[in-house]
Image (cartoon, rainbow, N blue to C red):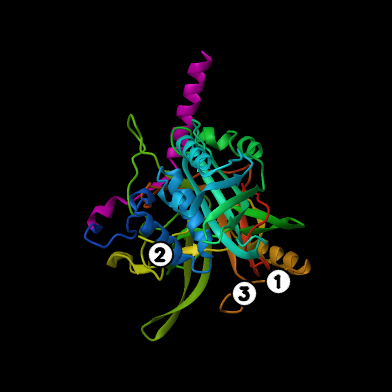
Amino acid sequence: MEGHFLKMVLLLCSIVSAVAFQIAPSHSASRASCRPLFSSVVPEESKSEEEASEVIKSFKPELPEAAIQYENAINQALKTNLDPLRKFAVSGATWDNPVEAQKDRAGMEKLLLDVGNFLEDPRLTVHAARARGGDGGGGALVEVDWLKTATWPLPWRPPVQVFGRTVLRLDGEGRLAAAADTWEQSPYQVALGQCRPRFWDFYHFKAFPPAEFPAYRVAARGEGYEVRDYAPRLVVVGRTLDRVNTRETRAARTLPESMFSCTISMIGKIPERFYVTSPIEVSFRGKMLKEGDAQKKVNAIQWKVGLPKAFGLELGGLPDPDGRETAQEMQDDRVWHQVDGPRRVAVARFNGQNQDVGVSKARAELLAKAQEDGHELLLGNSGRPQFSFLQNDAKVGFKRTGGLGVAGYEPRWDTGNEIALELAPPPSSSPSSSSSQ
């Protein structure tokens, strides 16, 4: 009886949540002749070792060569390709880490293969690195800041992430002789804190898996707000012109059709597996358009959605980040990819939607409190403060090849939505302690 009742509850949740789904527009077939908004992401396992390393290097020129090789070697080993690790690390290389210390490269290989077989889409993303000079024995030291992400193999597929740092000790030939990891949370804290099911995981059990949220640390807290340092991430950005320019149209409530580039099958005996991220970040900017001899004010609305962390920070295989115009019937829309961050923002909770009348008052209150507490603002090109709206009640689904195919909207009385104010970046762009939703 209890099992039957649970099935009915899950079925009801999936039906209720399905009402709020937004999928690729039905007329998308008519745009098949247009260039796709997103070019397919080449899966990392299909790249050669040289190609994968070159993609990382081309978009991270500021990183020391050892950090680039380390990231590539770890990620390739997690996908069963051990050649980069064997070229980078000497046979006697040691690895001190919170999971299981290894005394040689063979132990490193076994541990990485085991992790890759157990977790879904494990990845190490290096977002900062610096040389620390020699160790007194003829070798160099390189300090690497990273974010490790994966999906835990449980029925509700919870995403997990942890910040950390690795000190690499290189030999005289630049090969890895020893690595020492420091995690900002222990493996037990990661497993117990991030893998437990939440209400929304069960609410969407038959539809959406749990969403990945951007990785950040809380740098400070004020009255009614907190300051967050976000790690760099890969995002897809959509922009459109709201020519009606009125709150009543609620033009910013849902993603524009131009951002959808594929369809995702969510029904059938074996529904398609896909990535889910949240929130949708929305911002507004007034713009003057010339129509004949007159000037008309329109609202430029911009949506920003984080791509799954499994794609790392590489833009290879994605469209030109400068933007691309869509089909003629959507001439006011543009879509592009970019690396977003690192960034510092002040965030305050707002239990409403992005075009509610109360947003203006909430922005003013957040701005006043941040300035009163001495936080330096990051002004826009117009010299004005930059605000955005974090739509935590929305989830976005991506195909495993990178296309955006579905969005879901739900009431979130537990956390609510949020208003964000851009602040000047911290002295160091690498987070030193982690926290996330």
The amino acid on which the numbered mark 3 sits, given as a three-letter code, is Leu
Look at 67% across and 48% down and name the residue there. Answer: 184
Give residue 368's position: percent from left, percent from top.
Answer: 73, 67
What predominant SS class does the magenta segment belong to? helix
Which stretch is magenta? 1-30
Q: Which one is earlier in the sequence, the residue at label 1 or at label 2? A: 2
Q: Label 3, on which residue? A: 379
Asked whether residue 328 is drawn in magenta, I would say no
Q: Kindly give the residue lying farthest to the bottom in the view shown.
A: 293
Q: Which one is earlier in the sequence, the residue at label 3 or at label 2? A: 2
Q: Label 2, on which residue? A: 336
| Residue 260: quadrant of the picture | bottom left
The amino acid on which the numbered mark 2 sits, given as a three-letter code, is Trp
How much space separates mark 3 and mark 2, taking CA atoms? Answer: 23 Å
Asked whether residue 6 is drawn in magenta, I would say yes
How much space separates mark 3 and mark 1, taking CA atoms? Answer: 9 Å
User: What number of labels is visible?
Assistant: 3
Give residue 154's position: percent from left, percent from top.
Answer: 51, 31
Look at 78% across and 68% down and name the residue there. Answer: 372
Q: Is residue 383 visible to us here? A: yes
Q: Are marks 1 and 2 in contact (CB under 8 Å)?
A: no
**SS of the residue at dot 3?**
loop
Residue 29 sits above or below residue 57 on the image: above
**SS of the residue at dot 1?**
loop
Q: Label 1, on which residue? A: 376
Mark 1 Cα shell of 10 Å, populated few (<14), some (14-19), many (≥20): few
How much space separates mark 1 and mark 2, taking CA atoms? Answer: 29 Å
19, 153: nearer the viewer: 153
Q: Are marks 3 and 1 in contact (CB under 8 Å)?
A: no
